[in-house]
Structure formats: C-alpha cells, structure tokens
Image (tube, rainbow, N blue to C red):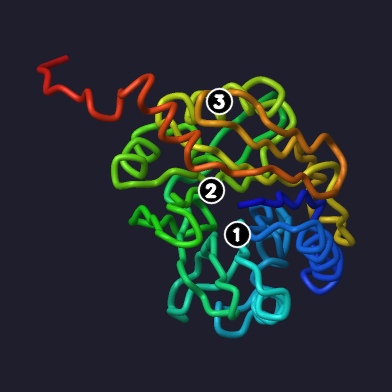
Amino acid sequence: MRAGLVQLTSGDDPEANLPETQALIDEAAGAGAGLILTPECTNIVSSDRAHQRAVLRTEAEDQTLAALRAQAAARGVWLLIGSLMLRADDPAEERLVNRSLLLAPDGRIAARYDKIHMFDADPRPGESYRESAAVRPGEAAVMVREPLPLGLTICYDLRFPALYRRLAQAGAEVLTVPAAFTVPTGEAHWEVLLRARAIETGCYVLAPAQCGTHPSRRPTDRPRRSYGHSLAVAPWGEVLADGGTAPGVTLVEIDPEAVAAARRRIASLKGDREFSGP
C-alpha cells in the first residue's frame, strides 16, 4: 500500500485550516495513496485555552471531521486524522480531548484513539507546556486490522516505548505517530526516537508532522513553531522519507514482507523474560 503523509502549518482558526488540509489530502489521493495521514492538531494549533474552548466542538458537531469524512468517502481512501482537538462529550468536563480518528473509504469512523501521555515539559528557558492542564488523557491503547495492522499513538506518546511494544505484540505492523513536535525537542530527539520505536518493534513508523510558525490572529496566543520533518521509517530502522520543513505530501510504499523480514532477523518481540528488581 502507498501511504501519504500530510504536513501542515495549522493556525488558530479551524475553518481557515480546512481548505489547505483538504487540498493536500486530494494531492496524496491523486498520487495513489490508499492510506493518508495528517498531523496532530489538524484542526487547530493555539495556546490560548479560552479561544480553543470558544471555537472547538464535540466530535458529533465538529465541522472538520464532517468535511474529512465526506472527502474520505469521495476519494475512496483510508484517512487517519492524526488528531483533532475536540470538546468532550460530557458537558461537565472542562478539559478538551486530543483524538486521532481513522476514517474508512466509505467515510465511517473505523477507530478512535485519545492521546494517553500529556506533554508537560519545559524544553528551553521561557518555553513551557502543560497539556495536562487543558486536555483529558486517554486510557486505552488502540490497534486496528484494516487497512493494515495499525497501532495508533500521538506525539508525546513517542517517549513511552512500552506502549509501542504492547501494540506490536498485539499484532501491529505499522505505528502511527502524528505530531506537533517543538523545534528544540524535534532537533534533538524526533528522528532518533522514531527510528528507535521502529527498531524495537520491527514495525513501519509513519509520523506526519506540523511545521513552521503557526498563524494566529489573537495577541494572547503565544507564538508557536513546530519542527516538521514528517518521517517514514522502515522496520529495520532506515528513514524512507523526510517531509522537510514546509507543508506538503510525502509518499512511501508499505511492504508487509519488510516487517516479517525484520522480525525474522531480530525476534525481540518474542524474547521477553520476567525479572526481579530494582
């Protein structure tokens, strides 16, 4: 199967972000991609929590999701919306959800995954993130069998290898890591972590990313830059494609035999042993 990784520079207006997202999905579909993936926070990138709560909707009401469901059906493709920022269905829940949605070629929602690990970090002086203050973490890992055995994750999950091992041991052959990595953490860790997850599991890793400086029309919104470099990594750890630093589409061929071959060479998924301590 050919996969298309969509790289975006989403801003703080979901309505304004949608046409660019749809245009790149069309480009990927036109290039023969049967599985298309968008980054984390496809519908909005904003640090203004009050603004997010004002413009975001529940899954059932979200206009981006409705439009992309129709597009997946019109194009007849599998579409992984890397994540949407959404209001929780429970009106008493003040926090948002950061949700990845897999759309089938008929437009139905085939799977949902809520980001488990929250990005609470201080990557450099004067730059601080507290995702847990505004986003409700998920509690369940998610794997699907179609269109390929996919294990769904989001961004900061990448730093927690036990999640990826569990997905691979449950049968995943492709791991998805849609992201909006910061520039300093991206420069230091993005590629090496993605390659490590591929090597540890013998899986393909597909990581569509946000890039560049995110447009904002609100003076209260702290300027945000994302690293870009959407990556596709092979099961043996080679980088197959790099999306660079501008919006666009990166194409890669997925060969299930490459997964089997890597796992024959190093069968570490079957080598777990019980141990004591520390």
User: What residue do we see at 60% from left, 66% from top?
Assistant: 78
Q: Which of marks 2 and 1 is nearer the N terminus?
A: 1
Image quadrant in which you'd find residue 98: bottom right
Name the residue carrying label 1: 83
Among all residues in the image, which is located at the extreme top? 278
Rendered view: 44 above or below 254:
below
User: What residue do we see at 50% from left, 69% from top?
Assistant: 94
Which mark, residue 195?
3
Q: Nearer the viewer, residue 217 or 148?
A: 148
Name the residue carrying label 2: 154
User: With 5 as the anchor, is 254 left or right in this view?
Assistant: left
What is the three-letter code of the residue carrying label 3?
Answer: Arg
What is the three-letter code of the residue carrying label 2?
Answer: Ile
What is the three-letter code of the residue carrying label 1?
Answer: Ser
Q: Earlier in the sequence, mark 1 or mark 3?
A: 1
Q: Is mark 3 on a helix, strand or loop?
A: helix
Among all residues in the image, which is located at the extreme bottom? 61
Q: Distance between the residues labelled 2 and 3?
A: 16 Å
Q: Which of marks 2 and 3 is in front?
A: 3
User: With 184 as the anchor, is 260 left or right in this view?
Assistant: left
Crowdedness near tag 3: few (<14), some (14–19) or many (≥20) residues, C-alpha within 10 Å: many
Measuring from the top left, give residue 236's x and y in whole percent: 51, 24
